[in-house]
Image (tube, helix red, strand yellow):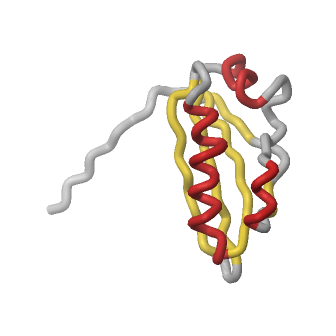
């Protein structure tokens, strides 16, 4: 499995609007691509802005190119992003999963 991570920042006032937009664009399009395994959107409020991280999960690198193009390290942005005063990363990181996930169940005593 491959995890592909993209980050952007926008003003706090646009936080929910941009997250909704991200679901309607990037998440929707990736979920319609063969090899897509899931996604997470994470947020971290800063003083005047919010950092938004989109992590998408894929079966292999080749399938990411169907969504991202030949260079999967280049972010795919949308024209409507501008209305959210977005400060996007233009480079996308990705990592291969090296081991099967481990689920740990903690019990409180």
In the picture as drawn, the residue positioned furthest to the left comes out as 109
Is 38 on the left or on the right of 55, as rendered?
A: left
Residue 85 visible in this rendered orientation of the protein: yes
Query: x, y percentage for residue 26?
Result: 65, 42
Q: In the figure, 29 relative to 65: above or below?
A: below
Q: Nearer the viewer, residue 105 or 27?
A: 27
Q: On the image, which quarter does residue 97 sit in? A: top right
Is residue 1 among what the camera can see? no
Q: Which residue is pictured at 63% across the width and 51% down the height?
A: 22
Quarter containing the C terminus: bottom left
Q: Quadrant of residue 72?
A: top right
- Between residues 37 and 15, which one lies in front from this camera angle? 15
Q: Residue at x 46, y 27 (%)?
A: 100
**Which residue is drawn at the image coordinates 27% and 46% (left, top)?**
105
Task: Reply above or below: 50 against 39.
Answer: below
Q: Is residue 3 left or right of residue 103?
A: right
Residue 91 image point, x, y percent:
83, 45
Q: Is residue 57 above or below residue 109?
A: above
Which residue does the image show at 71% across and 54% down from the upper left?
7
**How many dots with numbers?**
0
Question: Quick one: which residue is furthest to the bottom in this view?
Answer: 47
User: The N terminus is located in which quarter?
Assistant: top right
Task: Give the image quarter of residue 30.
Answer: top right
> Where is residue 16 drawn, in percent x and y?
57, 66
Q: Position of residue 89 (x, y in %)?
A: 81, 53
């Amino acid at each position: 499995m491959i995890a592909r991570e993209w980050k952007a920042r926008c003003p706090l006032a646009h936080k929910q609007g941009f997250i909704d937009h991200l679901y309607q664009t990037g998440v929707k399009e990736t979920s319609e691509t063969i090899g897509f395994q899931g996604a997470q959107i994470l947020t971290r409020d800063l003083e005047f802005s919010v950092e938004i991280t989109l992590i998408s999960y894929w079966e292999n690198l080749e399938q990411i190119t169907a969504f991202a193009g030949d260079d999967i390290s280049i972010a795919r942005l949308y024209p409507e992003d501008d209305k959210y005063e977005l400060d996007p990363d233009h480079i996308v990181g990705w990592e291969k999963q090296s081991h099967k996930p481990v689920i740990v169940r903690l019990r409180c005593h």
